[in-house]
Amino acid sequence: MTSLPSKELILKRLKKHIRYEGNHWLWVSSTRKGDYGVIGIENRQYTVSRLVLAVYLGLDYYDYSWQANHKVECQIPRCCSPACLYKGTHSENVQDSVKLKTQHWASKTHCPRNHEYTPENTIHYVNPYTGVKQRQCIICNRELGKIRQKKYQEKRGKAIRDAG
Ligand SMILES: [Zn+2]
Ligand SMILES: [Zn+2]
């Protein structure tokens, strides 16, 4: 097992890159893929959330049977507070994001063009790719159909004119 630098050193180095907001620790330094904080200590690079959990829970950083998952309650991707993370698995992480998407979906009362999602104006369907339940606004759906039809007819009319 490769060992980590001492807890004192890690915490000292982390602190310089964190802005504390209430219980949240906002990572304000380098990130990979936009939201995974990364830090170099003694010529090694670490993923911040994983490093924080390893230090706080006394876990083996190099044991890849676990991963640092973000709790659903904390909506700040770059937060790396040990209170907002938990030791979990990849599939738990997937479940969390499905849960979040479903919550997000349920909280909306209007479509992007501001028609209300009434029972009469809503098509329910399950996204075949994500398995997430989604809604579609019937008014928008109908208008989209009309626009498509109009475009198709214009094309067809033009084709006929071109041929003549
Ligand atoms: Zn947080
Ligand atoms: Zn609509």
Image (cartoon, helix red, strand yellow):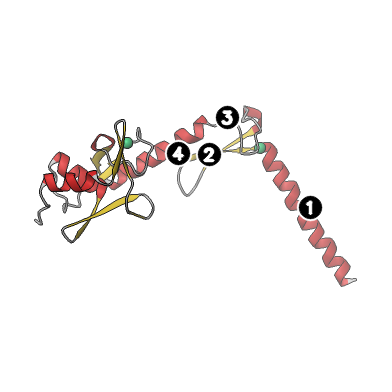
Which residue is situated farthest in the bottom direction here?
Answer: 163
Going by the numbered disc 3, the residue's amino acid type is Thr
Q: Quadrant of the N terminus?
A: bottom left
Frontmost residue, 118 versus 46? 46
Which disc, if any, is residue 101? Answer: 4
Circle 2: is it few (<14), some (14-19), or many (20+) Cα within 10 Å? Answer: some
The residue pinned by badge 3 equals 109
Residue 48 in the figure: left or right of residue 143? left
Please tell me which residue is depicted at 23% across the width and 38% down the height of the picture: 82
Q: Within 8 Å of ligand 1, the CB of disc 4?
A: no
Depth check, mark 3 against mark 2: the one in front is 3
Depth check, mark 3 against mark 1: the one in front is 3
Please tell me which residue is depicted at 35% across the width and 35% down the height of the picture: 74
Which residue is situated farthest in the right direction here?
Answer: 164
N-terminal-most mark, 3 or 4: 4
Q: Quadrant of ligand 2?
A: top right
N-terminal-most mark, 2 or 1: 2
Depth check, mark 2 against mark 4: the one in front is 4
Q: Does dot 1 land on a helix, a strand or a loop?
A: helix
Residue 64, percent across and down? 20, 52
